[in-house]
Image: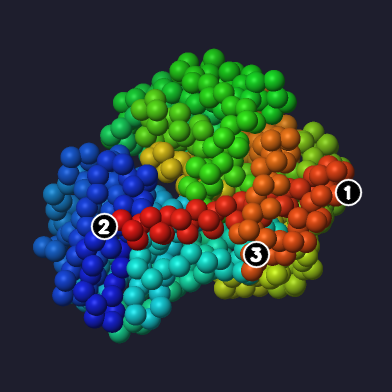
Amino acid sequence: MCGIAGFWNLDGRPVNHEELIRFTNQLAHRGPDGWDIHVDESANLGFGHRRLAIIDLNTGDQPMSYMDGRYWIVFNGEIYNFVELRAELESLGYSFKTESDTEIVLAAYDKWGEDYQFKLNGMWASAIWDSRERKLFISRDRFGVKPMIYLFDGKRFAFASEMKAFLALDNFHAEYNPTVLANSLEDATLVEGAEDCLFRGLKRLLGGHCLTLNANGDIKIRRWWHTLDHLPTVPEKYEDQVAQYRELFLDACRIRMRSDVPIGTALSGGLDSSSVLSSMSHIRKSGDATMRMAHEWQKAFIGTWPGKIIDERHYADEVIKKTGVTPIYCEMNAGMYLEHFNEILYQFEELSDIHLGPWFVHKMQRQHGVVVTIDGHGGDEALGGYTWHVFAAMRDANPIRYAELALIRNSMSLTHGLDTYINAIKNRLTGKKSASNGTSWLVAQPKPFSTPAMEQDAPRLAGRDELFKMLYADFHFTHLPMVLGNFDRLSMAHGVEVRSPLMDWRLVTFAFAIPSAHKIGGGYTKRILRDAMKGILPDSIRARTKKLGFPNLDEGWNSPRGHQFIKDAVASSDFKSSSFWDGKRINADLETAFQTNDKPRIHKAWRLVQAQSLLNMFREKTEKVSAA
């Protein structure tokens, strides 16, 4: 896991080494263990790398070369099956100088070309330079777990792990893309799954896509991964499906325990994170180890909110009791929300409600020496863990199944606005334009969300049931991309790598291949995972239906201190003179909103305050970097 950056000057400009170093070191938080650059002077190309050392601590430095310098790579992520891939490549005559997974990627690229991507089980964003062919190849993992941002103006192609890195480039100006800003403020799930980024000119290479660039400036982006093309044939009997899912899940956990540094987990007490920790414990206790498995793994970090209904400590303690791991409680309160606002927002660099919980838990992990955390992301979106998934399943259910789903729905914590959310997803997948509920405060208005991948998949989803379509959209295009982007930045802000067994491509394709009733049915959401964890997970957790997760405390902004924070921000000259919204009208409207405690309108203003604050920080950072 690392921070990567690089650029190729296609107009003949030589690489400015100082600029490349600045560009790279903007990502120092992602890689606190060292840095280096590589420059191909003959091509005017430079790579930069900030290392978070996890595998092969001594010889795994990057940028890394292979085949006598023909190939160079900067790689962010982990390849969990690198042990097996190395053995296969060695049998084909390849040799290696390091013990890292990065060198395996280079050999695989040499052997199989771009098809090497199908060989990898992992998460990654990488750039490979072929100095012989004068070709740059950039790849992103199947589901977009690791980020890849780029900028191309015809003269220079630049890429990096985060938007803030581009602040170090000469002639880059931090300005919002008005449409993306509007979409982000209306619905935060419409950002990470789209190509255009929040800041003007920046693009996102989407998950399951790769990019090729040659010396003539010809750029080609293609989608290399289609989940629908890789759905396996699953056993007919449900009990056999459960057995196979259990086997796959345990193996997904097993290979993610490969590490040369201590690992831990963020435990909420919910089904997904509890399943991960309990399975790790099961693997260790059963002696079912794997090569390169971490020696230290027994720490579970639990975010707690004393006195709040959202506190899940009592659930987490049940898992701790069964596994015997060491709990580390991370106590939080609403006051910390504003106290760390600027720090979190800068690292977050997006406008969905910033989350104190994961930011603080990952900070505590790093302080306790844990560099890798194995967590439960992806289970809700693949297996139907949210209330709106139950509502989606009800839309085309027969009377008997409808009654069953109604009982499941009633056992969960209900969420408002479900019909709107479901209809929005349905419209996106069918190509229909949904009416915007954007605020009249904005100059630009949100636009219907769509990507080429969504349009490509829509005809193939037409015959699927409502739950399948909802899960497919949430997983690939909307909700999960937002979650993955958020947690990547919040964890890497502290130099902590997040690994997610439930994101293993074998589990994902299996989940999309089984009937919807095996995901939501039998009285529960995520049915197959609950049944697969029998004997491993405490029964009280397997049967738990109330879902809390990391909270987003409104006490941070909806409090006397928060109200004053908002009032001061919207009264500033920068906010009032913004070209993106009507600052004067907002100030007038908020007077009434504060008097009547109109939470939706105050929250809308709070989101705009975030937008102005982030823009100010990016501009200030640009000035500081330029001055340096």
The three-letter amino acid code for the residue at tag 3 is Ser
Q: Give the CA separation, mark 2 to mark 3.
A: 35 Å
Q: What residue lies at 31% left-to-right and 68% top-to-bottom?
A: 7
* 402 in relation to 40, above or below: above
Disc 2 or 3, which lies upstream in sequence?
2
The answer to which image quadrant residue 383 occupies is: top right
Nearest to viewer (mark 3 / mark 1)? 3
Q: Earlier in the sequence, mark 1 or mark 2?
A: 2
Instruction: Report the residue that reaches farthest toward the bottom.
Output: 216
Closest to the observer, 208 or 183: 183
Give the residue pinned by disc 2: 21
Point out the frontmost of discs 1 and 2.
Answer: 2
Say which element carries label 1: helix
From the viewer's perspective, is 254 left or right of 336?
A: left
Q: Which mark is residue 286?
A: none
Residue 26 coordinates in the image, percent (x, y)? 36, 53
Pick the residue in front: 189 or 613: 613
Vertical comparison of 24 with 526: above or below: below
Q: Nearer the viewer, residue 136 or 6?
A: 6
Query: Residue 211, position in %: x, y?
Result: 39, 71
Q: Residues within 10 Å of mark 1 (few under 14, many from 20)?
A: few
Furthest-left residue in view? 68
Q: Amino acid at mark 2?
A: Ile
Q: Distance of mark 1 from mark 2, alpha carbons?
A: 63 Å
- How many numbered marks does the figure carry? 3
Answer with the quarter of the image where residue 59 lies: top left
Residue bearing the label numbered 1: 399
Judge the density around disc 2: few (<14), some (14-19), many (≥20) Cα neighbours within 10 Å.
Answer: many
